[in-house]
Image (cartoon, rainbow, N blue to C red):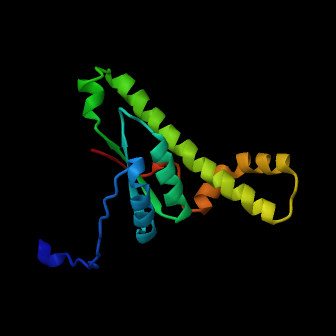
Amino acid sequence: MDKYIKKQTKPYLINLIDSPGHVDFSSDVSTAVRLCDGALVIVDVVEGVCVQTHAVLQQAWREGLKLSLVLNKMDRLILELQMTPLEAFLHITQIIEEINIIINSFIAFDRMTQEEGDGDDTVEGNCNDVNNNTEDDAKKEGVGNLDDSVVIVV
């Protein structure tokens, strides 16, 4: 059967750069972000979104990286915290929503600074435009809702 199927493959080179998320290693994160085309943002589902997660997301956003969210240590929700499936689902959904809020704030900030450069001095008008256009701007920037993105569960 394989002789009838011709597969055309292109070779890809993938270099993985592991950078700790701890605040003591923020300079390593900055260096790694500049060298990469994309990033796997790993979030511990028990710890949730931490301050350093926000900083890493901001650095990745500034460099224009494609982001994929990885939810790690899922077993701890059941084994350690004794969550029901519904509680675990709601907890995970909340983490994804927090990440979406952070990314949407970056989109809104970019939109506001872009409009300020156009000479529009009305702050209220800018805020209303940002709130109405955030999803459209995300699609233009190539960033979809994380609910639609690849979520890797480890």
Q: Which image quarter holds the C terminus?
A: top left
* Residue at figure coordinates x 80%, y 60% from the top left: 116
Q: Is residue 94 above or below residue 144?
A: above
60 lies left or right of 44: right
3 lies left or right of 119: left
* Residue at figure coordinates x 29%, y 65% from the top left: 16
Q: Is residue 79 above or below residue 132?
A: above
In this view, the residue in front, 89 or 26, is 26
In this view, the residue in front, 132 or 106, is 106
Q: Is residue 16 above or below residue 107?
A: below
Q: Position of residue 117 (x, y in %)?
A: 79, 65
- Residue 4 visible from this viewpoint: yes
Q: Position of residue 21 (x, y in %)?
A: 38, 50
- Residue 147 visible from this viewpoint: no
Q: Position of residue 143 (x, y in %)?
A: 54, 57
Q: Position of residue 41 (x, y in %)?
A: 40, 51
